Image (tube, rainbow, N blue to C red):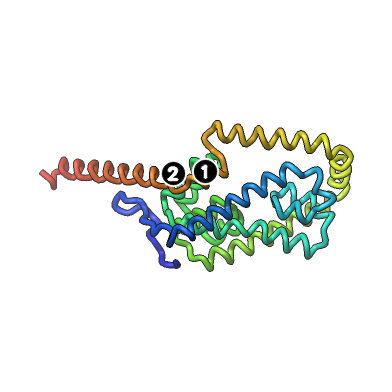
Amino acid sequence: MDEQPPTEHEAGHHRPHPGPPSAAARNLVVGTLIAFVVASNLGNIFLSVLVTERPLVFIGLNAQNRNLALASGELSAWSFYVVGFLRLVAPDPLFFLLGRWYGDAAIRWMERKAPAYGELLRMLERGFDKARFLVVAVAPNNPVSLFAGASGMSFGAFMAANVVGTIGRLALIRAFSSAFEGPLGSLKDFITDYRWPILGVSVVLVALSMWSDRRGGRDGISDLAHLDDDIADIEAELTAEDAELEAEAEAGAGDSPAGA
């Protein structure tokens, strides 16, 4: 697993990938990631009910920065760090595996399914090898984890950087929550007072977000469920692009003085 595939395109060819070791392994990874998507949506929907009454469940479902900051004041340090750490880190090795299994096709898949990260991924492709540990530590998110796997970064180095970055992120959020305890407390009081209307609004907002994503050709659950089909289509595109590049290179060689 720690063999290093090429990190740059060589001779016009995209990186080869081994694919998953078995259908069972692929299904386990994809199924677990789908469960995380469902959990995140539930956390967004039930924010108003859980943030003060079940803060540990709240961040266990969805550990976005906003949710961590809101829940921090309701939790002891050990529960905040343990549950927050586990929830933040849990999806990352799975995206790393997708990157390792599917290579460049996985990167293109992520660019299409998360266009907000497209430019980030293109920037990483140009300079990731020079600062891979720093990049993962600063931004240990799903796209970066996938790219780390596709780039050939070793799993041990990836996890070390991920752990350092995640602990640092939690420490900063904990400090922020403590520094702004007053305003955050007032916000939580408001949420508690209007929990049921806010719950209704949350249901509508999550539904609208899912509908908008689906209209735009993006749906976290569907995207993961159809990963194999999408990867196969992208592999065909990359192969065709490689063939086109080779044909152009051969034509250029033929037109050169040396090829005359």
Work out which quarter of the rendered image holds the C terminus and state it.
Answer: top left
Residue at 50% of width from left, 47% of height from top? 121
Near-viewer residue (249 or 221): 221
Q: Which residue is mark 1?
A: 223
Q: Are marks 1 and 2 in contact (CB under 8 Å)?
A: yes
The x and y percentages for residue 140 are 60, 56
The amino acid on which the numbered mark 2 sits, given as a three-letter code, is: Asp
Residue at 75% of width from left, 51% of height from top? 58
The x and y percentages for residue 14 are 35, 51
Compared to 149, does 49 lie above or below?
A: above
Residue at 50% of width from left, 55% of height from top? 27
Question: Label 1: few (<14), some or many (≥20) within 10 Å?
Answer: some
The x and y percentages for residue 157 are 53, 66
Left/right of residue 48 with respect to residue 14 in the rendered view: right
Compared to 176, does 190 lie above or below?
A: above
Residue occupying the far left of the picture: 260
Q: CA distance from mark 1 to mark 2?
A: 8 Å
The amino acid on which the numbered mark 1 sits, given as a three-letter code, is: Asp
Label disc, if present, on residue 230 of the rendered structure: 2
* Residue 207, quarter of the rendered image: top right
Local secondary structure at mark 2: helix
Compared to 133, does 209 lie above or below?
A: above
